[in-house]
Image (cartoon, rainbow, N blue to C red):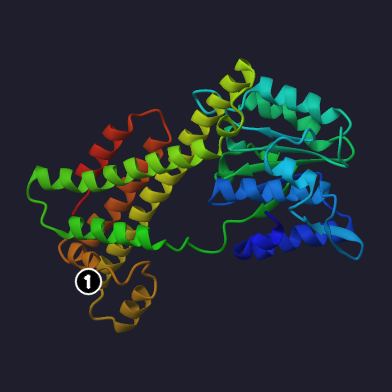
Amino acid sequence: MAFKDFPTQTFGTRLLQRSLERGRLGHAYLFSGHDLLELENLALTLAKVLNCQNPVRKNDAAVDSCDQCAACKKIENCTHSDVHWIRPESKSRIVTIDQMRELMKDVQLKPAEAEFKVAIIVAADRLKVEAANAFLKTLEEPPAKSILILLTTEPQRILETIVSRCLRLNFAGEGARKLEPAEMQWLQSFSEMAAAEHKSLLSRYRLMDVLVRKLTELKAAIDDSLTKRSPLQRYKDVEPDLAERWEKELAAAIEAEYRRQRTDLVGIVHRWLRDVWLRALQGDTRKQPAANSEISALLNFPQLEGTNRVAGRISSSDAMQNLQIIEQIQRWLHTNMQEALVLEVGILKLRL
């Protein structure tokens, strides 16, 4: 991929290209956004541009890769000796101090076959505190001709001492993420199920089942996608130690991506429950047309009929309590609490 292949991220890529053109590229970057895979591809593309043998130039400076030369192909296949990747690889999805020490040792060496050494830390929010602290000196004063790129979908979880030493680029876009058609279809099904009468415990468990089945589909799709991308699929005859490392990295990557997408899915439910709250507020302000109009303009999903039915039978205070419950679910899911138990307790507590 080249920078031109990111049409929805033109602001961030143009900033990088402007820095390249002016010879003012930073030594350390923090890329944040909704999609870790997209962030990986952006970092990979920057590594290509820095080491491309036939780059696209502007004012005699490389601003994009050819995506065809030997160096670009090696970087694309993660086989370039001067581009280093660090990923969470333990069962707890942590980037360990041993991984960072090995990276720091590699970064200190001169480039073996290219102009720049590039180190990319995937899910930098998973850096253990001691690993992050050990990395600070290198992050602040990296060797010449080296670029460090940290990637995260949760920048608020990164130590401030790390953040302050990086140039930040946000690739998340502005405002709430627009739902894909499949996501919108699922939310419509969920809202319709929620809008049905919930006089029995069985009906509430049916609502939970809608959420659980979607999560199961997400996990299976993530497992299939990341397994196909793993170097384990491309290089069969590797040393056992390396194969074991790749297996651990794959398992950690699958779990991390699942947790991210699970957070997104529960976030979609949160956005819908916010609409329910706004509609319930409208019921409290029927005699204030101006306020009513302002509230309607704030809805995330005005087309969903289930929103009105739920809002019509609960108070605005109950609707606000639902928001607090879904926020608590998100907090619980970030702990080691069992997912099924968290969802069961949360869904049963909702006022519908």
Image: 233 above or below 49: above
Left or right: where 119 falls relative to 204: right
Q: Seen from this angle, which residue lies furthest top?
A: 240
Q: Amino acid at mark 1?
A: Gly
Percent coordinates x, y for residue 249 in the rendering: 56, 28
Percent coordinates x, y for residue 236 in the rendering: 59, 26
Image: 42 above or below 281: above
Identified at 52% across, 34% down, the residue is 253
Q: Nearer the viewer, residue 57 or 33?
A: 57
Q: Seen from this angle, which residue lies furthest left?
A: 200
Which element is circle 1 on?
Answer: helix
Image: 231 above or below 271: above
Identified at 51% across, 64% down, the residue is 175
Residue 78 visible in image: yes
- Image quarter hosting the C terminus: bottom left
Q: Which residue is mark 1?
A: 283
Left or right: where 341 falls relative to 167: left
Identified at 43% across, 36% down, the residue is 334
Identified at 44% across, 39% down, the residue is 224
Q: Nearer the viewer, residue 53 or 3?
A: 53
Quarter of the view holding residue 57: bottom right
